[in-house]
């Protein structure tokens, strides 16, 4: 009966130990591709055998934890996640596993001395305590991974997080190695408290790491958005320069054409000159508003639409308080989203209207919105740029859809116009 219970407890201990290790890499497995099941099964069998054999080879905790950690990290990397952050999570799990075993060992020593337990009872108590601590700490780690899992990112710095589990494991080793005088003076309760605090510190750092990674990702995203805005603004500045040059050329060509018309008496020539004038008109810049940069943006975005499809009424609205950069950011993104929502079809139309009501400037853009499988309802990264630009002027944006019509309304606190 005693032998059967021993086998049962060893099986339970091995199952919990291997199962907890598997559970961690299973949570991380969504980060990369897996391998064949047979290879994974063989890897876990070898991991379980190492956990049994290594503690009995010289009874060296440093050797046991070093070999197990290296094997576990390599096994998780090649067979499960292929993630740098996954390596850090595995390291923290190894600290969790080792701290749980140390806490269980000293708890058992304390309880055995207090209750004067026999050898088999101590073995039974050690196994149950170790498995309970490991199970609870693993569930806590899994809960953090489920809610605040940090994925690999370009701007993510990993060096600082690697230090936390590595130093934690080294500190536990050092406390155990130099613990004879410490235990004699303070008892086993202090080392248990120390290991528990190490676990709390690791879990807390892991919890905060999510916020650090999110801030780094947001900073990178803002830098990309700013770069995109600057490129868009530069594009329209160059376009404005080209328009200015073309207007001068068109003006000179018109003078020559007028002189040639006066000199010609042929009807065919008159028809030819009319066609040339129409072509020159198409090259000119339409004036939709009194804002120079807004004219450039509107000409660029609406150039492929007929007058029936695109109607713009912005006369009398003063947008001079907006910088050229923010003009391009706001209107280029909104018009791009509108065109993607239904542009390219004959049925598409867009209306742009602005007016000043007391102290507020209101601009409304509404357009037909077809279900074409493209980006719907103006959603996309462009709207984030628009919202950031609006905040500089205490502006607000309201978007909505009714049937096949989508509308965006911009409201700016302005000044009263002089009557």
Image (cartoon, grey):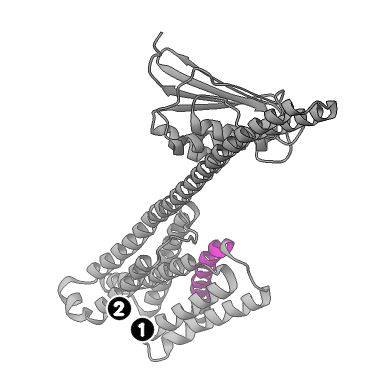
Question: Could you tell which of marks 1 and 2 lies nearer the N-terminus?
Answer: 1
> Most extreme residue toward the top, as rendered?
419
Q: Looking at the image, which residue is at 55% across and 69% down?
A: 82
Q: Name the residue carrying label 2.
A: 173
Helix, strand or loop for disc 2? helix
Mark 1 nearby-residue class (10 Å; few <14, some 14–19, many ≥20)? few
Q: Name the residue carrying label 1.
A: 62
Q: Looking at the image, which residue is at 43% across and 66% down?
A: 134
The quarter of the image holding the C terminus is top left
Viewer-nearest residue: 339 or 178: 339
Q: Separation of disc 1 and disc 2 at Cα?
A: 8 Å
Viewer-nearest residue: 223 or 324: 324
Mark 2 nearby-residue class (10 Å; few <14, some 14–19, many ≥20)? some
Viewer-nearest residue: 291 or 339: 291
> Most extreme residue toward the front, as rendered?
263
Asked whether residue 108 appears in the rendered view, the answer is no
Cβ–Cβ under 8 Å for marks 1 and 2 = yes
Q: x, y (%) of residue 343?
A: 70, 35
Please provide the residue range marked out in magenta: 8-30
Indicate the quadrant where residue 366 lies. top right
Q: Please say if 152 is above or below 177.
A: above
Indicate the quadrant where residue 155 lies. bottom left
Q: Is residue 25 magenta?
A: yes
Helix, strand or loop for disc 1? helix
Q: Count how many numbered circles sit on residues in the image.
A: 2
């Amino acid at each position: 009966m005693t032998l059967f219970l021993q086998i049962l407890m060893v099986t339970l201990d091995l199952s919990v130990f291997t199962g907890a290790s598997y559970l961690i890499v299973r949570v991380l497995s969504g980060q990369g591709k897996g391998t064949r099941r047979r290879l994974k099964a063989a890897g876990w069998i070898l991991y379980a055998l190492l956990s049994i054999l290594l503690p009995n080879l010289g009874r060296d905790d440093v050797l046991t934890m070093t070999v197990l950690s290296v094997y576990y990290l390599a096994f998780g990397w090649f067979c499960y996640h292929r993630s740098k952050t996954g390596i850090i999570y595995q390291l923290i799990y190894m600290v969790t596993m080792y701290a749980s075993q140390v806490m269980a060992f000293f708890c058992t020593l304390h309880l055995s001395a207090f209750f004067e337990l026999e050898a088999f009872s101590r073995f039974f108590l050690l196994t149950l305590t170790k498995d309970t601590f490991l199970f609870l700490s693993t569930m806590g780690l899994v809960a953090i991974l489920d809610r605040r899992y940090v994925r690999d990112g370009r701007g993510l710095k990993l060096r600082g997080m690697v230090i936390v589990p590595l130093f934690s494991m080294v500190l536990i080793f050092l406390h155990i190695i130099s613990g004879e005088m410490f235990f004699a003076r303070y008892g086993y309760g202090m080392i248990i408290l120390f290991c528990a605090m190490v676990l709390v510190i690791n879990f807390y750092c892991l919890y905060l790491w999510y916020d650090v990674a999110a801030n780094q990702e947001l900073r990178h995203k803002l830098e990309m958005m700013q770069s995109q805005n600057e490129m868009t603004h530069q594009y329209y500045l160059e376009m404005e320069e080209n328009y200015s040059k073309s207007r001068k050329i068109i003006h000179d060509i018109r003078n020559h054409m007028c002189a040639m018309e006066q000199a010609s008496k042929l009807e065919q020539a008159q028809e030819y000159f009319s066609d040339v004038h129409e072509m020159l008109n198409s090259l000119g810049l339409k004036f939709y508003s009194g804002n120079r940069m807004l004219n450039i943006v509107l000409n660029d975005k609406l150039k492929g639409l007929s007058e029936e499809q695109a109607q713009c009424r912005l006369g009398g609205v003063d947008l001079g308080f907006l910088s050229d950069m923010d003009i391009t950011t706001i209107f280029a993104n909104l018009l791009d989203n509108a065109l993607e929502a239904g542009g390219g079809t004959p049925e598409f139309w867009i209306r742009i209207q602005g007016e000043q009501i007391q102290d507020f400037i209101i601009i409304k853009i509404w357009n037909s919105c077809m279900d074409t499988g493209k980006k719907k309802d103006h959603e996309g990264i462009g709207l984030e740029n628009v919202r950031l630009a609006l905040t500089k002027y205490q502006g607000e944006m309201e978007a909505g859809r009714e049937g096949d019509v989508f509308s965006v309304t911009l409201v700016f606190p302005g000044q009263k116009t002089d009557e």
